[in-house]
């Protein structure tokens, strides 16, 4: 009898309109646990190399973990996996909210979707029963309307719905997937994969209670973490200011990504701070399943010239910058409106802001003209133009909207004339809003992330800067004993970030929120381990969990190798090898290119990969129980 | 007399339950010594700014100054 997981994996073939349920052995769950590891298992087993991401042959996988739905703090997340239409690489994106736990209560540990429907459909899953329902009447509609219609038609206001909006239907390459209107599987364009399958939504409802091995122990640990969360300064900061709390530091330090990364100095930065947001447009804060932190912002604007619907939540830090200073915009109300539009159409706000900023720079440099923009004065700071561009991209209006919907990498190739000088991406995915010149470990992760640049691939450098920093004090159990400089790129930094990469990969696999546990918050490694043990009944260890994380990193890496990616793709955008321009950091900060390359080579070696090619050794695959993938690297290692 | 005014930002305000701390010194003093005297853990402080300049913790304060402290921060 399994504890905390259901033992059921749902397979759906949308071409044949059929489904069946697989019941894997316990060892399967103990090897892959959930999230990206489960997703990659099926992607590597069942998807042919070089599959077109927008074809029916792509898989689309929704995977919580063995412990998702456990009533412990900050474990609400689930992963969506597919081959990414934005990068052509292994794609994945995690989301919080309520959908993942509800899927578990409805009786499934994961959904593996293959094929494609010819007409719009949605899945309705309730207590182990599955229906493939017509969604013709929902196609083309915005997310709020779709959620309302489905709940009314099925007669239950508590149904949890994950879905795509028009951007997903229109195959925008950075379309995302949303649950509860405000929790996103944000990156990699997985909403377009959903759209290509004509899958509008998955509605779930469960009344089953997950069996927990030691409910009392889970309750006890939950209580002690929750009590500390309520008073701990880091957790309080997240609750009171949310992720925008970091705006002030970046703005005052002069590393706030601005004007398409041409400077870190944004004169109107005060307008974008969490404090300003709280004083002007904040309506309330909300949280995810079983989380006491409540870091999510809900904003509202109700003025004659601009209105923002609070049902779509509010902008996170990444959104405030990508739809703000990156585009030269300092009006929070317009940023909130842009966020609302992206949310109702389901577009990733990081990529959306970055492609618009790219187009703005192209326009200012004369690579795009008013004819290209259909009369829009697409200059930095033009907030009305930004809103218009979001509409054009979501609906792929002929011309610039359709072009930018391909993402900045493809758009730049098509524009030509040196436009590639104005894009900032890794593996085709636009970079997030944290500058690696002040946090070099983040830069390593940007370069190495198999799914393209990502800011949540490891904890950030400042948590490890001093012997008294939380990362050093709380993570000695992983062998993290010595502080490293946030701006250094030496061997100790590389070794540290190998561990941090694996550690947060474990979080991703388990659906654990980074904001609930060390180093970002107060739950300790010991407490998290106790929750996992008490939920599952497995006497697991951090040794075993770290191997689970490392296994999935190797699986993702092998997936990309067979897609044709090489070590040349593990690099940083050119801008980070240059000094800051303007502001307090003017003339400083450039990452040394040769040092960075050496760091990547060392990281490969630490992973058991070839230092030149990054190809995993046969021994590493054996160590991780991945001998079934040996043929994927055999020719490359010979 | 050198007056040093420490200005807290972000979660440092929550942790040290104040927006500012003021200390007086008879002679020039380094930032790390001020942090020690104010009982502020360097592990909580990511960046130190004096005026418009970003400085290291061994920076010598030779005259009355406002020293702004920015907390360690992560992603999101």
Image: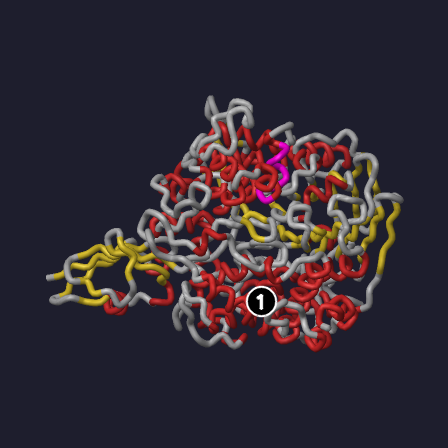
The spot of residue A86 in percent (x, y) is 65, 46
Q: Main secondary structure of the magenta part?
A: helix
The spot of residue A169 in percent (x, y) is 71, 36
Examine the rendered structure and indicate whether residue A409 appears above or below residue A374: below
Residue at horizontal 13 percent and vertical 61 percent from the top = B2
Total numbered badges shown on the rendered structure:
1
- The residue most toward the front is A417
Residue at horizontal 66 percent and vertical 32 percent from the top = A142
Residue on which disc 1 sits: A503
The spot of residue A447 in percent (x, y) is 55, 59
> Camera-side residue: A546 or A473?
A546
Examine the rendered structure and indicate whether residue A32 appears above or below residue A209: below
Query: Mark 1, chain letter?
Result: A
Q: Magenta stretch?
A: A402-409
Q: Is residue A47 magenta?
A: no
**SS state under label 1:** helix
Q: Residues within 10 Å of mark 1 (few under 14, many from 20)?
A: many
> Camera-side residue: A59 or A23?
A59
């Amino acid at each position: 009898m399994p504890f905390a997981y259901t033992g059921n994996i749902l397979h759906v073939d949308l071409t044949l309109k059929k489904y069946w349920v697989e019941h894997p052995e316990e060892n399967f769950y103990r090897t892959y646990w959930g999230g990206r590891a489960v997703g990659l298992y099926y992607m590597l087993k069942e998807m042919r190399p070089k599959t077109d991401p927008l074809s029916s042959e792509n898989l689309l996988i929704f995977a919580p973990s063995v412990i998702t739905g456990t009533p412990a703090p900050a474990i609400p997340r689930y992963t969506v996996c597919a081959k990414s239409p934005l990068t052509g690489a292994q794609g994945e994106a995690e989301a919080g909210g309520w959908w993942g736990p509800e899927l578990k209560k409805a009786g499934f540990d994961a959904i593996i979707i293959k094929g494609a429907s010819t007409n719009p459909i949605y899945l309705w899953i309730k207590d182990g029963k599955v229906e493939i329902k017509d969604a013709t009447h929902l196609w083309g509609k915005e997310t709020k309307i779709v959620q309302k219609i489905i709940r009314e038609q099925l007669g239950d206001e508590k149904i949890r719905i994950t879905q795509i909006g028009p951007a997903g239907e229109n195959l925008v390459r950075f379309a995302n997937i949303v649950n509860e209107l405000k929790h996103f599987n944000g990156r990699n364009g997985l909403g377009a994969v959903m759209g290509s399958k004509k899958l509008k939504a998955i509605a779930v409802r469960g009344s089953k209670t997950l069996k927990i091995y030691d409910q009392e122990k889970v309750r006890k640990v939950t209580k002690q973490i929750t009590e500390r969360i309520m008073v701990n300064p880091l957790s309080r900061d997240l609750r009171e200011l949310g992720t925008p709390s970091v705006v002030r530091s970046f703005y005052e330090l002069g590393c706030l990504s601005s004007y398409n990364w041409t400077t870190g100095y944004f004169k109107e930065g005060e307008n974008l701070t969490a404090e300003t947001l709280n004083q002007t447009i904040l309506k309330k804060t909300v949280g995810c399943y079983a989380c006491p932190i409540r870091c999510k912002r809900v904003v509202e604007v109700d003025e004659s010239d601009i209105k923002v619907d609070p049902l779509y939540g509010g902008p996170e830090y990444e959104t405030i910058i990508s739809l703000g200073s990156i585009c030269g915009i300092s009006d929070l109300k317009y940023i909130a409106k842009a966020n609302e539009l992206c949310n109702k159409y389901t577009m990733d706000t990081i990529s959306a802001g970055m492609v618009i900023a790219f187009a703005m720079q192209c326009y200012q440099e004369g690579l795009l003209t008013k004819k290209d923009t259909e009369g829009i004065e697409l200059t930095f700071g033009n907030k009305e133009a930004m809103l218009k561009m979001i509409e054009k991209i979501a609906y792929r209006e002929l011309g610039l909207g359709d072009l930018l919907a391909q993402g900045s990498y493809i758009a730049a190739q098509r524009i030509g004339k040196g436009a590639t000088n104005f894009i900032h991406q890794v593996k085709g995915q636009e970079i997030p809003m944290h500058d690696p010149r002040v946090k070099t470990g983040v830069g390593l992760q940007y370069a190495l992330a198999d799914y393209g640049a990502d800011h949540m691939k490891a904890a950030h450098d400042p948590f490890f800067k001093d012997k008294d920093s939380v990362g050093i004090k709380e993570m000695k159990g992983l062998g993290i004993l010595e502080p490293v400089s946030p701006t250094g790129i030496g061997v100790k930094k590389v070794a540290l970030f190998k561990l941090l990469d694996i550690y947060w990969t474990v979080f991703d696999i388990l659906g654990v929120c980074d904001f609930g546990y060390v180093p970002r918050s107060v739950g300790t490694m010991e407490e998290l381990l106790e929750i996992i043990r008490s939920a599952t009944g497995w006497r697991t260890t951090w040794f075993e969990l770290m191997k689970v994380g490392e296994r999935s990193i190797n699986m993702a890496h092998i997936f990309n190798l067979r897609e044709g990616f090489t070590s040349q793709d593990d690099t940083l955008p050119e801008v980070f090898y240059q000094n800051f321009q303007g502001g307090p950091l003017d003339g400083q900060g450039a990452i040394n290119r040769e040092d960075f390359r050496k760091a990547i080579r060392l990281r490969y070696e630490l992973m058991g990969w070839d230092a030149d090619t990054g190809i995993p050794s046969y021994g590493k695959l054996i160590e991780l129980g991945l001998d079934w993938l040996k043929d994927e690297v055999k020719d490359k290692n010979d | 007399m050198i007056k040093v005014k420490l200005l807290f930002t972000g979660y440092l305000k929550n942790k040290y339950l104040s927006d500012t701390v003021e200390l007086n010194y008879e002679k020039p003093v380094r930032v790390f010594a001020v942090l020690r005297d104010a009982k502020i853990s360097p592990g909580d402080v990511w960046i130190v700014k004096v005026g418009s300049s970003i400085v290291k913790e061994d920076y010598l304060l030779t005259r009355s100054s406002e020293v702004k402290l920015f907390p360690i921060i992560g992603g999101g």
